[in-house]
Image: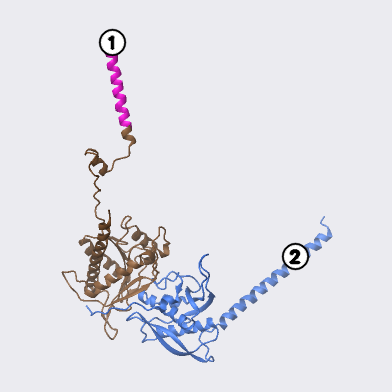
Amino acid sequence: MIPRYQKILFLVLLVVSIAMGAILVRLRERAHDRLLKGEDLAPTTAPVVAPSEQATLLVANDMDESLVPEERSLPLPKDAGARARALLERLLEIYASPDAMHPVPGAPRAVEQVFLLPVPNGPAGKSEAKGQLAVVNLAAAFADGHPSGIEAETLTVESICGTLHANLPQITQVRFLVDGQPRATLAGHADLSRTYLTTEAVSPRPSSVSGAKP
Amino acid sequence: MISIFSSILQRFCGVLLTATVAVAGLSCLAQPAPTPQTAGNSATAPTAPPRAPERPSPRFVVVLDAAHGGDDNGGQLGASVAEKTVTLDLSVRLRSLLTARGMQVITTREGNVSLTNDARVQIANHAGSGAGAAACLSLHASQTGSGVHIFVSSLAPAPPSRFLAWKTAQAPFVTRSLRLASVVNSAFERGGDTGETTAGPIAVNLARTSLPTVDSMTCPAVALEIAPIRGEDRKVVTEVTDPQYQTQVVQALAAAMMAWRTEAESDAQPRKAGQP
């Protein structure tokens, strides 16, 4: 025979368990709604209400493998991450235009997010790294549609790194994700698994040598 | 009595002789195997100076990596030609030219097969049996840009060390890779002038990049990307698939490898002269 107090205790515990389960499910739903709401609020284009500012875009040119600095006036948000994203969206829009010197097919929301993080410290004994690490999350549609080739992919990566550094000098390193996942190469060539130093992109490129056609 | 004594003495001598021969044989077995050098000197007077062994001159090994292959088509060149086909064509043609010039050529693939980047690097890094390959050429083709693009790893030069990290193994070779790129650039400027035929110069762009294969190679390595020749209006004048253009490219590369071999030999000469 089960004592009465044990029956009562069992019932109380059962009711508490069911209540806690219900609360947990509700909290999960609320967190999910909050995340979705946050994603919806993420700026897909630079807000028009923001004042226009001068920005320097390092635009690639396939013909001589150069990065040409171009001054553009565009509305930029105050938040550094959103600002970086707006800059890169504008840069990739230039590449998607029909008369681009570095043609890359456009994709909706080609740059999904740009996260700015403190540069992680190196191994023990090394000097402390300074600046910020920008993690650029590209859309898979953009990466999949990118022309395959060492030159084309390298120029895209370098122009992204150079544009970020030119407008946000605190960004010293850049890493890439595609749809939130690490990817080996952009379109079969340029290594996306490594961390790029923005100083590499802004350093002068070797001069090209021109010759006559065969 | 005397006969008995002599027979005992003979048997004793026979046993002694057998024992001596056995001991001598065992002592010979215990010695290390003679090298050709020591074996040749054993019969000569002990005062004769030992001759240095004649080593065959190391072969000039070139690794050709035709990019992509198998399931990986690479870029699309024109309507129906894949990058993997053009790179294989270039590799096969260049291999023939280099072999005809007395070089040892190792290719990463000879057909339409899939190869991982690591497998390509392993082939390149095992070439040259210890001495390493004299040059590693990664062959690519693209529809963007104009002329030939020469790429060297963007890794910062590093001093040589016994153990190398896989993803940055190219770092100690970057300085030599830059020199190799310069030699290849000069050859394209001259248009593959091999002394027999001169086809004219080809537009060349030099740059640095981060390629997973080249960054892991332990040899002077460059990646070459062959793009169409474009006119002033950016219109394509000569396609990558043009056989004459491809011939011109491989001739220039063969001339570059000849120049690289000459440079390597002239570098080795002072070192040899400085040896005791």
Q: Position of residue B75 (x, y in %)?
A: 35, 73
Q: Which mark is residue A14?
A: 2
Which one is nearer the viewer's eye here, B262 or B215?
Answer: B262
Q: Quadrant of residue B194?
A: bottom left
- What kind of element bears circle 1? helix
Q: Colour of chain B?
A: brown
Q: Main secondary structure of the magenta part?
A: helix
**Quadrant of the image for the N terminus of chain A?**
bottom right
Q: How much space separates mark 1 and mark 2, taking CA atoms?
A: 116 Å
Q: Is residue A2 magenta?
A: no
Q: Residues within 10 Å of mark 1 (few under 14, many from 20)?
A: few
Task: Please report, as a chain letter, where disc 1 is located.
Answer: B
Above or below for B240 versus B100: below
Q: Which residues are magenta?
A: B6-26
Q: Quadrant of residue B84?
A: bottom left
Which one is nearer the viewer's eye here, A97 or B82?
Answer: A97
Q: Position of residue A5 (x, y in %)?
A: 83, 61
Q: Is residue A96 visible?
A: no
Q: Which residue is mark 1?
A: B4
